Image: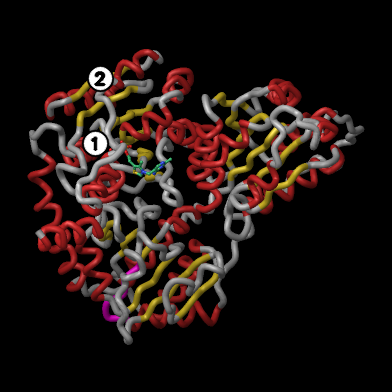
């Protein structure tokens, strides 16, 4: 067997089903091996390596298995950087295989030569160049182990030509997978007993406790464990953007999303009033804490943080208690402990009060949901989507208009529906390729991609991929002919000195149609409702080009922007 065949045998042993990538001059041995591995492993051709890495990222988030992607030497790794960096910083196990030039050509101006190990060093958990065929099984096992254990993350493996083509008399003895690392988080750890006891006592003794769940809780699949504990003690639950969907949005204990982008004011109010805050799988970074100002400092408030990465614990706030371990296991253990210590709570007075606030918030938004105004209000677009999304839906959003309106108004009903968003770097152009990875991880789900024209410009090539794979996705293009997010910042902070934020209005639906996709142009509320009906009745992909209100005309629900606008109003 040659190195490429050994690699592919190892991927099979790890039950890898999909590899996303783009071919190049150096990829031939790998492609031959993948060709022979069909249908156990299928290769998905992306139109850009960046997209391939976003596909692998979305696949991993939803399949709870490592996402595999590959690219040829030189330009391939360079174009792969965004998705690898995003996956790594978002704790997603993505493994990138680069088919590299021959070791013999190193340092001799070989075309596409690049120090890939160095390139990926700062944006992966591990980046290495294989030096011998004999090492392939061992290195692949190490790659899966490092990707899926501890804080999961990205891996880069470079296979020089000699390693891909080198032959090894392989007796099969070494071609085995460490199956524990075929899914993640692998080797989950429980919390220390003493800390669990203290956490249980703090929650039981609290008068106004609250749970805040982040992306880590989603990765750990802790939704049920969180709901079980919250229901026993009647604890309200808010989430960060990455945790959105962990608890069904219509659950009586679900307060919504906190932080800067799209926040629910009643959830912020509940945080402020809480005496015990339990953060689960949440880094407590700048967005979810509004630049570390929320929760405000109160001497008698307890902050408890659960995270699988001890390096995260207590990093940004003065925790009263830190618990290292897996979110699901810890919440399950806490539930058992709490049930043994105290009966189920029945006094709903606090929850009723919070729900009155929540109801007022949604009532106030109702007029926007039915607004006929054109360009169409993003609130109306999301509300129209809410009415139609089936169980199970996977919603994927890009930066720009989609983010604050989705985090504020999208309603996920549990049942495995999920919201994906690349929150480490917020790179434009994620949603369209991510739909591909999401579909392969969750073929049962209806996919919904939301993106602005800035993102479309960066990912339009993948419309062809969706057509080729006939993915049943509803793509909603928020068309405002500008980098609206940045233009709005220029309005707020640069005295309306607009620079390089406007596009020439065009007809993007024609681009989608050019790739063979059904596409509708939508300007009015009636067209939106009809278009969405048609979209959800459709089996393949469909592109809805919706002319939507700009951030410059209507400030979106971003907490710090609203404060900046108030200041501006006062100073004028
Ligand atoms: C790759 C990348 N480059 C730049 C940015 C900075 N950025 C954040 S939002 C934004 C504008 C988004 O414009 P668009 O997608 O048209 O959405 P809109 O805000 O107009 O709704 C930009 C350029 C980014 N997030 N990602």
Q: Quadrant of the C terminus?
A: bottom left
Across and down, in percent, residue 475 comes to 33, 29
Front residue of this view, candidates 342 and 248: 248
Local crowd size for mark 1, using a 10 Å CA cut-off: few (<14), some (14–19), many (≥20) = many
Q: With 376 as the anchor, is 454 left or right in this view?
A: right
Across and down, in percent, residue 164 comes to 79, 31
Residue 417 visible to the viewer: yes
Q: Secondary structure at mark 1?
A: helix
Q: Which residue is mark 1?
A: 385
Q: With 563 as the anchor, is 367 left or right in this view?
A: left
Which quadrant of the picture is home to ligand 1?
top left
Task: Identify the residue shown where x is 66% and y is 32%.
Answer: 74
Task: Identify the residue shown where x is 24% and y is 42%.
Answer: 498
For the residue with label 2, is its CB less than 8 Å from the closest atom of ligand 1? no
Front residue of this view, candidates 252 and 509: 509
Q: Which residue is mark 2?
A: 520
Q: With 377 as the anchor, is 289 left or right in this view?
A: right
Q: Quadrant of residue 5?
A: top right
Based on the picture, tell me whether residue 275 belongs to the magenta stretch.
no
Local crowd size for mark 2, using a 10 Å CA cut-off: few (<14), some (14–19), many (≥20) = many
Q: Secondary structure at mark 2?
A: strand
Q: Earlier in the sequence, mark 2 or mark 1?
A: 1
Magenta residues (range): 206-211
Q: Quadrant of residue 434?
A: top left
Task: Identify the residue shown where x is 39% and y is 25%.
Answer: 472
Image mark for residue 218: none
Q: Quadrant of residue 70?
A: top right
Task: Identify the residue shown where x is 83% and y is 43%.
Answer: 135
Across and down, in percent, residue 230 comes to 34, 66
Across and down, in percent, residue 124 comes to 61, 50
């Amino acid at each position: 067997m040659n190195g490429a065949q050994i690699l592919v045998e190892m991927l099979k042993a790890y039950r890898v089903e999909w590899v996303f990538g783009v071919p190049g001059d150096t990829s031939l041995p790998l492609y031959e091996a993948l060709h022979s591995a069909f249908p156990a492993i299928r290769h998905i051709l992306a139109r850009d390596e960046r997209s391939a890495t976003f596909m692998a990222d979305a696949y991993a988030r939803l399949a709870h298995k490592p996402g595999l992607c590959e690219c040829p030497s030189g330009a391939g790794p360079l174009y792969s950087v965004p998705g690898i960096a995003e996956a790594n910083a978002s704790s997603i196990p993505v493994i990138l295989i680069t088919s590299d030039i021959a070791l013999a050509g190193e340092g001799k101006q070989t075309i596409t030569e690049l120090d890939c190990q160095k390139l990926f060093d700062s944006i992966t958990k591990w980046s290495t160049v294989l030096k011998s065929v004999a090492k392939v099984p061992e290195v692949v096992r190490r790659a899966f182990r490092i990707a899926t254990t501890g804080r999961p993350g990205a891996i880069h493996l470079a296979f020089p030509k000699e390693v891909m083509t080198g032959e090894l008399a392989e007796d099969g003895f070494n071609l085995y997978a460490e199956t524990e690392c075929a899914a993640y988080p692998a080797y989950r750890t429980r919390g220390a007993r003493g800390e669990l006891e203290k956490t249980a006592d703090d929650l039981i003794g609290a008068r106004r406790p609250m749970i805040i769940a982040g992306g880590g809780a989603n990765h750990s699949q802790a939704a049920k464990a969180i709901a079980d504990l919250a229901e026993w003690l009647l604890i309200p639950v808010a989430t960060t953007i990455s945790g959105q969907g962990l608890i069904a949005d219509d659950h009586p204990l679900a307060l919504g999303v906190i932080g800067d982008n799209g926040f629910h004011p009643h959830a912020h109010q509940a945080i402020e009033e809480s005496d015990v805050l339990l953060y689960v799988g949440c880094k407590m970074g700048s967005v979810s804490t509004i630049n570390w100002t929320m929760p405000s400092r109160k001497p008698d408030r307890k902050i408890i943080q659960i995270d699988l990465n001890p390096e995260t614990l207590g990093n940004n706030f003065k925790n009263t208690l830190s618990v290292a371990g897996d979110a699901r296991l810890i919440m399950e253990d806490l539930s058992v402990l709490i049930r043994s210590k105290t009966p189920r709570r029945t006094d709903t007075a606090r929850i009723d009060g919070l729900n009155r606030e929540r109801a007022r918030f949604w009532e106030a938004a109702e007029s926007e949901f039915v607004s006929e105004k054109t360009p169409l209000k993003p609130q109306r677009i999301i509300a129209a989507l809410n009415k139609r999304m089936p169980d199970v839906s996977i919603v994927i959003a890009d930066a720009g208009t989609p983010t604050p309106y989705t985090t504020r108004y999208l309603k996920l009903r549990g049942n495995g529906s999920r919201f994906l968003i690349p929150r480490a770097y917020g790179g434009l152009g994620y949603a369209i390729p991510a739909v591909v990875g999401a579909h392969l991880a969750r073929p049962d789900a209806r996919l919904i991609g939301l993106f602005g024209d800035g993102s479309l410009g960066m990912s339009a090539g993948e419309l062809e991929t969706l057509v080729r794979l006939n993915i049943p996705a509803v793509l909603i293009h928020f068309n405002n002919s500008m980098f609206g997010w940045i233009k709005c910042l220029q309005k707020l902070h640069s005295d309306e000195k607009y620079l390089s934020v406007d596009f020439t209005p065009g007809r993007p639906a024609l681009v989608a149609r050019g790739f063979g996709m059904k596409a509708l142009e939508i300007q009015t509320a009636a067209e939106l409702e009809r278009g969405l009906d048609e979209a959800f009745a459709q089996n393949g992909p469909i592109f809805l080009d919706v002319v939507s209100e700009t951030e410059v005309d209507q400030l979106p629900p971003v907490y710090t922007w609203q404060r900046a606008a108030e200041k501006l109003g006062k100073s004028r």
